[in-house]
């Protein structure tokens, strides 16, 4: 007898039509959002109901294939814009508080700023000042913007970096991605005013998902067509593996004559008991954390999944289906227990999760 599998329809709660999908959707402490775009220099601040508070030209567009990344402090009083040649810290009215200039990043590279979980520290990486100097990690005090310490990383314009705050206020997980070639994890920590940096070889070629709400572990997605892996924190020991074949073993809702579905780089904790993964077909599958069984699927309103034949044409003939494609572009979970999606129509949408998942 197979496992119980429930498809859960979700009605659209809020929607906002945009001319283009944002590069970043940054959630604020008050439930609002900051949005920036690929070709548009403006940043838009929204309240929790998607009403526009302001729209300002902050030169937040992509330059030389380097995205401008926006992050926000946990208390919602500051935002950081990390661009091609400058780190900027601003207040939530977009007044400049601090700026740090650096050498330009190479194409498709870069690093966001990251605020520690308590908002007291700011972390970022910039390129070295010459071809003989590797990328440099900085830790800055958020109260006076003084540089506390620096650390030279392993790469020299080789990686696109991402930061992930941890339950430890003095530590970050850094993901260093070299395109399709490799993905490395580091734990960086500030102690007694000095940075330490250790490579997490256990997490090689993984993509960071999120920490569990209790902070005792984190989940990772595959960099290639592998499975989902979980790691304890702070020990960083692999605690569980869900292989791709096991995840999709009973998922026959979208049959195909060619390769099956796989995880599309995204795995998140919904709560301590449930994981959410986004798949290549555009599905949002729910996984029980304890058993690692696939127990259900979120079915957001207005997000169709279409079947295609060998010629790339939509088809309804089951014997001609070789692939599926959905309309969801990006997936996130908000602090208000909502599903936040970008849709290929150019809309940002939110959906309330059922109480059983909150």
Image: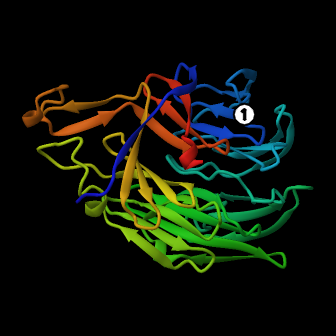
Would residue 263 be seen by someone viewing this image from the given angle?
Answer: yes
Name the quadrant containing residue 327. Answer: top left
Q: Residue furthest front?
A: 1
- Residue 17 x %, y %: 55, 19
Q: Residue at x 65, y 66 (%)?
A: 215
Q: Nearer the viewer, residue 305 or 58?
A: 305
Q: Is residue 321 left or right of residue 221?
A: left
- Residue 11 x %, y %: 50, 28
Q: Nearer the viewer, residue 34 or 331?
A: 331
Q: Residue at x 10, y 29 (%)?
A: 317
Q: Residue at x 16, y 42 (%)?
A: 256
| Quadrant position of the N terminus in the picture | bottom left
Q: Residue furthest left?
A: 319
- Residue 155 x %, y %: 54, 67
Q: Residues within 10 Å of mark 1 (few under 14, many from 20)?
A: some
Residue with the mark numbered 1: 32
Q: Is residue 58 positioned above or below 277 on the image?
A: above
Where disc 1 sits, the SS reads loop
Q: Is residue 84 positioned above or below 150 on the image?
A: above
Applied colour scheme: rainbow
Q: Residue furthest right?
A: 144
- Residue 246 x %, y %: 28, 63
Q: Residue at x 17, y 42 (%)?
A: 255
Name the quadrant containing residue 235. Answer: bottom right
């Amino acid at each position: 007898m197979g496992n119980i599998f429930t498809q859960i329809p979700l009605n659209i709660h809020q929607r906002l039509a945009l001319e283009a999908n944002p590069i970043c959707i940054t959630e604020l402490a008050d439930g609002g959002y900051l949005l920036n775009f690929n070709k548009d220099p403006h940043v838009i601040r929204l309240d929790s109901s998607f009403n526009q508070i302001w729209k300002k030209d902050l030169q937040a567009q992509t330059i030389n294939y380097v995205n401008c990344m926006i992050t926000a402090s946990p208390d919602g009083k500051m935002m950081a814009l990390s661009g091609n040649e400058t780190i900027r810290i601003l207040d939530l009215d977009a007044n400049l508080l601090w700026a740090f200039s650096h050498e330009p990043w190479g194409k498709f590279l870069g690093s966001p700023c990251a605020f520690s979980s308590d908002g007291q520290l700011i972390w970022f990486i910039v390129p070295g000042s010459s071809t003989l100097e590797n990328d440099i990690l900085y830790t800055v005090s958020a109260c006076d913007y003084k540089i506390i310490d620096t650390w030279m990383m392993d790469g020299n314009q080789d990686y696109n970096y991402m930061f992930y705050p941890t339950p430890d206020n003095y530590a970050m997980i850094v993901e260093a991605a070299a395109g399709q070639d490799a993905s490395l994890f580091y734990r960086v920590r500030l102690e007694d005013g000095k940075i330490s940096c250790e490579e997490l070889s256990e997490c090689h070629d993984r993509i960071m998902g999120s920490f569990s709400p209790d902070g005792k572990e984190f989940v990772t997605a595959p960099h290639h067509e592998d499975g989902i892996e979980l790691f304890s924190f702070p020990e960083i020991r692999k605690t569980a593996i869900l292989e791709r074949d096991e995840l999709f073993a009973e998922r026959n809702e979208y049959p195909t004559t060619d390769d099956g579905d796989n995880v599309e780089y995204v795995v998140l904790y919904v709560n301590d008991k449930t994981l959410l993964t986004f798949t290549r077909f555009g599905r949002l599958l729910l996984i029980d954390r304890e058993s690692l069984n696939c127990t259900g699927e979120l079915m957001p309103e207005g997000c169709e999944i279409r079947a295609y034949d060998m010629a790339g044409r939509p088809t309804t003939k089951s014997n001609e289906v070789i692939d599926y494609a959905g309309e969801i572009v990006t997936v996130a979970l908000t602090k208000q227990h909502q599903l936040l999606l970008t849709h290929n129509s150019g809309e940002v949408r939110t959906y309330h999760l059922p109480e059983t998942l909150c």
